[in-house]
Image: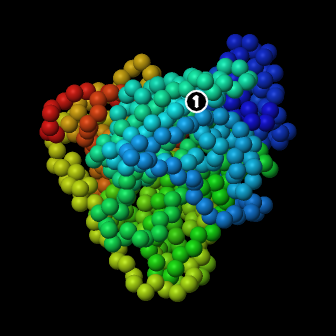
Amino acid sequence: MRGRGTFVAPLALAVLVCGAAAIALLAMKALPASAERAPAAQPIHVHGSAGYYRERAGMRGTAGLEDPNLPSTAYSEPHVISSHNGVLRVTFKPHVGSAIVNGQRVYGMTTFTGTYPGPTLKLRPGDTLRMKFVNQLNQDTNLHFHGFRTSPSGLADNVLRTIAPAVTTRTVQSGKSANIVVHIPKDHEHGLFWYHPHMHGLVDGQVYPGLAGLIIIGNVLEDLPYLKHVKQRVMALQSIQLNGNQLVNVNNAKVSQEVTLVNGHYQPTLTIHPGELQLWRVGNISNDFWYRLKFGGRPLYVISEDGNPVGHVWSAPKLLLPPGKRFEFLVRGPKAGKYTFDSARFNQGFSNFAPYTLANIVSKGPPVSKRLPIPKVASPAQRKIQRETLSDPVAKRRTLTFSIVHPFPKNLQGFKINGKLFNPHVVNEKVKLNTTEEWLLRNTSSEDHPFHIHTNDFLVMKVNGHNVGINGFQDVVRIPRKHNGKAGTVLIRMRYRTFTGKAVFHCHILFHEDNAMMGIIQFTKGPAKAQ
Ligand SMILES: [Cu+2]
C-alpha cells in the first residue's frame, strides 16, 4: 500500500455502494493493532478525513510533539522558481510518491514537483503565472493562490474549477494537462502568499501529505530601502505524523503525534549576529495546526500580515498563526548564545497545542557595528488604503454565524455557516465592486475557527465587541469560540476591488472546510469608483 494510503478514503467512496468491497478496502489500510486507533468498521461517507475527526473527537488533549528520535537537520529553504521577463512558467504534476523530509526519503507523500514543501514561486506585481498542471492523482483537484488579489474566474484563481485526473490507468500518462494562468495586478501587494489545492471535500487529504508551497510577490521591503541588505529567512511551517520512513495517512494521523517541520526540517539551526536585524517570513501551510510564534519574549516587529505590508509597524512578543496565516517580522539578534524560536501553548478549544521548539537559534560572531533602527511605517500606500477603507460608508452589514452540529452527524457534514452546509450551486453573499461592507462573524461552537476569504482582504475592527488596533489588512482571522454561553465575534470591514466573479469564504481548518463550513461570494459590477 506504499504511496497510496492517502487516497484510500476517497477510493472507498467510489465503492461504497458495494459494502463488502468497502470493508475489504478498509481492511487494507493496514491499521496498526493499537487500541488508540478508531475502529475502521464505520463507513466513510465523504472524501477526506473520517478517521481523523474520530481521533480528534476522542482525543481532546495536548497536540504537537517534540520527538527525541528525530535528528535535527541543517536549515535550508525550498527551491525558488522565479519569473523572467514578466512570466513565470512552471509545470506542476500532483502525484503520490516519496519526498525527502528532514534528510530522509519518506513514502506516502503527495507533491507537485517531488519536494516537500513545494517550490517557492517568486513573481513581481504585473507578472503572469503560466502553469502546466498535470493531475496525476486518482481524484479531482485544482489550485488556489492563497491571499492573491486576482481574478477568481476562468483559468486563474478559480477554486470552483475541477481538474480531473489526467491519469486513467495504473500506467502514468502525462498527456492530458490543464493550464492555469494568473495575471497579477500591477498594484498588487508585496509579500508572502502560498498555494494549495481547493477541491471541496478533498482539501485536507491533499494539503496534509504535501500539496502546498509558498509564493513571494515583489519586495516587501520596497518602501524601506535602508533594510535592503537585511537577511531574510523564509519559513514554511507544516505538521505531519511519521512512522519511520512512512507518512501516516491523514485518516490515521493523531494531532498528538504530529511533528512540526520548518521547510521540511525538524528543529533546524539558524544563525544570527548579536544586534543584527533579520526578516523572518513565516507561513502556516499546515492542514490544521495553529502556531503561536515566540522568540524568547523578544519583540517581533511586524512588517507584513497575510501578504499586506502594514501601515504602522507594530510589535508583539507572540504572534498567533492560525492555519493559512502569514507574518513577516523583524527580529534582532540577542547577545551571543543559544536560543530557540518556539510555538507557545495555544488552546483552540478542541486541540490544545503544547509549547514546542520550531528552530534553534545561535547568536554568534562580533556584534554588528551599525544597529539598524526599526521602521515606523512599512508601507505609506497601505496606510492610505486603510484610511480610505475606514472612512468609506458601509454599504451593507451582514452577519455570518459559524456553528457545529450537535450531535455530530455520522456523515461528518457538521460544520455550518448561517445554518447551511456548503452548496456549490448556491451564491450565499452577493456584493458590489467598489463598495465597502462590514461583516459580523459569530462563532457559537466550542472551538475557534479561522475565517478566510478569497480575492479581497479585510480590516479587523472589533473582537468580542471590543475595538482593536487596526493593524492592516488580513486574509485569515481567528473567530473566538463561545464563552460563558455567548458567541465569540469578530467585526471585519472590506472593500471589494477590481474583480468580478465567484469566490469563497470558509473556515481554514481544512477538515471543517471539507465538511461544509464554506460559502460562495459573488462580486458583481458596482459604482465606477469607491463610494
Ligand atoms: Cu473551523
Task: Give the structural element (helix, strand or loop) at label 1.
Answer: loop
Q: Nearer the viewer, residue 225 or 23?
A: 225
Q: Which quarter of the figure is the C terminus placed in?
A: top left
Q: Nearer the viewer, residue 316 or 200?
A: 200
Colouring scheme, one of rainbow, by chain, secondary structure, one colour: rainbow
Q: Nearer the viewer, residue 33 or 128?
A: 128
Residue 210 lies, in percent from the top left, at 62, 43
**CB at disc 1 and ligand 1 closer than 8 Å:** no
Q: Residue at x 29, y 70 (%)?
A: 376
Q: Residue at x 32, y 44 (%)?
A: 126
Q: Is residue 457 visible?
A: no
Residue kind at label 1, given as amino acid type: Val
Q: Residue at x 44, y 22 (%)?
A: 424
For this view, does 310 lie left or right of residue 111? left
How many numbered circles are shown? Answer: 1
Which residue extends farthest top?
A: 17
Residue 455: image quadrant is top left
Q: Nearer the viewer, residue 59 or 231?
A: 231
Residue 100 lies, in percent from the top left, at 70, 50
Which residue extends farthest front?
A: 85
Q: Which quarter of the figure is the N terminus placed in?
A: top right
Residue denoted by label 1:
134
